[in-house]
Amino acid sequence: MRLNRQHELFRDSVRAVLERLFLPGLDAWESAGRMPTHELCRALGEEGLLGLTLPEGDGGLGLDLGYSYVWAQELGRLPAGSPAMSLSVQTDIVLPLLAEAGGTAVRTEFLRPAVRGELVATLAATEPGGGSDLAALRTTAVRTAEGIRLNGGKAYLTHGSVADFAVVLCHLVEADGGTGPTASTGLDSLTLLLVPTGLPGVRQDRHTGKLGHRSCDHGTLTFTDVLVPEENLLGKPGAGYELLTRVFTRERAFLAAVSTARTEAALRQVTGHARGHTVLGKPLVDHQAIAFRLAELDAELALVEEYTGAVFRLLDEGAPALRQASIAKLRAGRLERETADLRLQLHGAAGYMDGSAAERAYRDARASGLAGGADEALLHLIAGHLRTDL
Ligand SMILES: Cc1cc2nc3c(=O)[nH]c(=O)nc-3n(C[C@H](O)[C@H](O)[C@H](O)COP(=O)(O)OP(=O)(O)OC[C@H]3O[C@@H](n4cnc5c(N)ncnc54)[C@H](O)[C@@H]3O)c2cc1C
């Protein structure tokens, strides 16, 4: 992405806002296992940060994707992964989806309030039985005379237990006169439905205890005969896969930018440590084995950062860049994990202890191989392009 002076001025102001809102409480929230998501969203909404790239008519600022890139990088520089994990769902997954596919009622009742930070959103795709194989999802909605009747369950959702509404990926099928829904699975019936979590039949539960991202909410949603108004359909019935593909593209680019920023911060920190920590009479960085490891990571970071910026540029130009965004996320996530591992290693046992920055970064980095698409799901997609494009 070619960033200009306006982007850099935005970087300064967004950094100041994020440091003001997150730094005083972040350590305590990580220990307590929760952050005040609604309060933070409201504060960020007041700053206009939840709708940077959304149309002005929807309450956004109508800016280019360079601003989303800077937003992702600055979130990534915070000393825990939770803020980026939490806010990416709101700003770069669900709200762009509503802006693209929501009808008038959805825009008025959900999109605009969410841009103001009054409503918290979640994307509900993954199910307890699996998330990579979308066609195999089991949550089903049936069109009836009273509305769309939804049944099923979702898990591992960021904001799952605190969200005011969910965008739910389900198979939409037609009723067949009382004997049950017409059989329909596969990608063609996948549909996105906006479900307010206050509707009768919706149950929200929280995942307690997880490796990383401790203060970011993760939860489950269970739907039992939930009646959803027809106007809450996002796009056409059966358009779910196509819409989600576009959203995943943006999400993966965003997560790559977050991972890149986290790698950069980690590398800077561990390099400083390697200059100051002495073993066998000389600083770690003067041991060639260590210097070369750091140099390898630094070289890889330069490439991944450049590539991720290029993906944002493609997206800003409107190109379909799912393959490129998947490559960026795969490599940036792996690099984040590799760097976090070396960082912990070079801090020795001190880095292994609870409360060390290296330990938190190590735990948080692990999610980069799962959230937003497991590494193997990304490789499957990239391999699919190899089969057809060569
Ligand atoms: C921190 C975090 C936040 C998340 N937030 C959300 C969210 O907000 N909304 C949401 O819907 N989901 C969310 N998820 C779930 C995430 O999207 C899934 O974990 C991911 O899609 C993988 O699905 P799964 O965990 O069900 O694993 P499965 O689909 O059961 O796959 C298990 C494993 O099989 C392997 N695998 C998968 N596909 C292939 C393949 N094609 N070839 C070979 N091996 C393969 C991978 O190693 C994978 O990890 C989140 C997950 C985490 C960890």
Image (cartoon, rainbow, N blue to C red):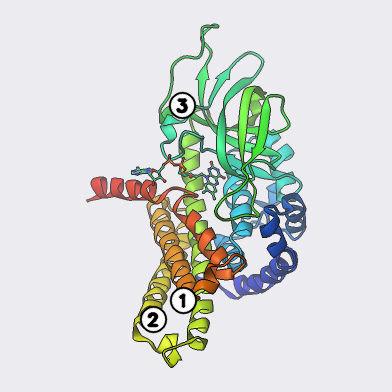
Asked whether the viewer can see residue 54, the reply is no
Q: Residue at x 44, y 57 (%)?
A: 329
Say what amino acid the circle numbered 2 marks.
Ile
Q: Is residue 91 visible?
A: yes
The dot on residue 189 is: 3
Q: Position of residue 35 (x, y in %)?
A: 71, 54
Residue 242, percent from left and from top: 46, 38
Q: Is residue 288 above or below residue 132?
A: below
Q: Residue at x 75, y 61 (%)?
A: 47
Reading the image, the residue beneath label 1 is 346
- Crowd band around label 2 with a 10 angstrom C-alpha radius: few (<14), some (14–19), many (20+): some
Q: Position of residue 343 (x, y in %)?
A: 48, 72
Give the image quarter of residue 107. Answer: top right
Q: Which mark is residue 290?
A: 2
Q: CA distance from mark 3 to mark 1?
A: 51 Å
Q: Amino acid at mark 1?
A: Leu
Question: Of helix, strand and loop, which one carries label 1?
Answer: helix
Q: Earlier in the sequence, mark 2 or mark 3?
A: 3
Say which mark, if any, is on residue 212: none
Q: Say what amino acid the circle numbered 3 marks.
A: Ser
Of the two numbered discs 3 and 1 on the same chain, state the one appearing first in sequence: 3
Q: Are marks 3 and 1 in contact (CB under 8 Å)?
A: no
Residue 148, image x, y percentages: 61, 21
**What element does badge 2 sit on?**
helix
Gap in angstroms between the C-alphas marked 1 and 2? 9 Å
